[in-house]
Image (tube, rainbow, N blue to C red):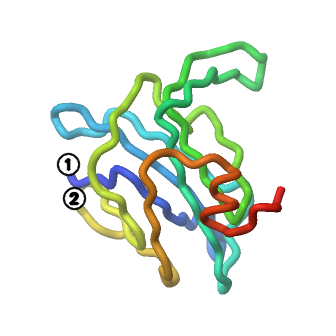
Amino acid sequence: MAGESSWALWVVKPADDVYQWKFTRTAVGTDGKVTQSAEVSAGDLAEVNTWVQITGAFNAQETWEWIDPADGTKTETRYGKLHLFVGEYDQQAGETAGFSSPQQGSGELSLGRGTTSGSTGNYLPGGLQDLRIWTGAMTADQVRSQVLNTPDSV
């Protein structure tokens, strides 16, 4: 994988004392180099010094049309879609939430740290309490009922 993390739930620090959650996935070519990345960022800033439930789901079967918000025209078909849930809320996905061609996932899942160009860094400024992995994509209802155990939430 050329030292890259294929999947990552992580937090970025765009400014002092400001954090934002992200869910990313990379695709690599036969040469091991990253060919595409998909990403969903949380709409709100991450809360600090408190417990938070972050869930990432990738639906490889989901195809969708990216519509340019500036003029409402379709720009291209996207294959697969990342979903980032902060608590029970599915974050707004933009044009970078999928790939321009179907991609098979492989590689490692990175938690609490990230690897870029063979160098490990981007450490989580907090604690990781729990990790659960499911095979297959989850819907928003499944995240609420199976991950958060809140089946009556909106």
Q: Nearer the viewer, residue 121 or 30?
A: 30
- Please name the amino acid that badge 2 sits on: Gly
Q: Residue at x 52, y 83 (%)?
A: 126
Residue 96: which quarter of the image?
top right
Q: Residue at x 75, y 62 (%)?
A: 151
Farthest residue, direction left: 31
Residue 153: which quarter of the image?
bottom right
**Image coords of residue 87 (percent x, y):** 69, 65
Q: Nearer the viewer, residue 76 or 122?
A: 76
**Image coords of residue 51 (percent x, y):** 65, 81
Label 1: state its secondary structure.
Answer: loop
Vertical order, 94 against 17 (above or below): above
Read off the residue under disc 2.
Answer: 118
In the rendered view, does 30 fall on the left or right side of 133?
Answer: left
Residue 108: which quarter of the image?
bottom left
**Image coords of residue 123 (percent x, y):** 41, 74
Residue 115, numbered label: none
Label 2: state its secondary structure.
Answer: loop
Q: Residue at x 49, y 27 (%)?
A: 79
Residue 2, numbered label: 1
Distance between the alpha carbons at the discs numbered 1 and 2: 7 Å
* Sequence-wise first label, 1 or 2: 1
- Please name the amino acid that badge 1 sits on: Ala
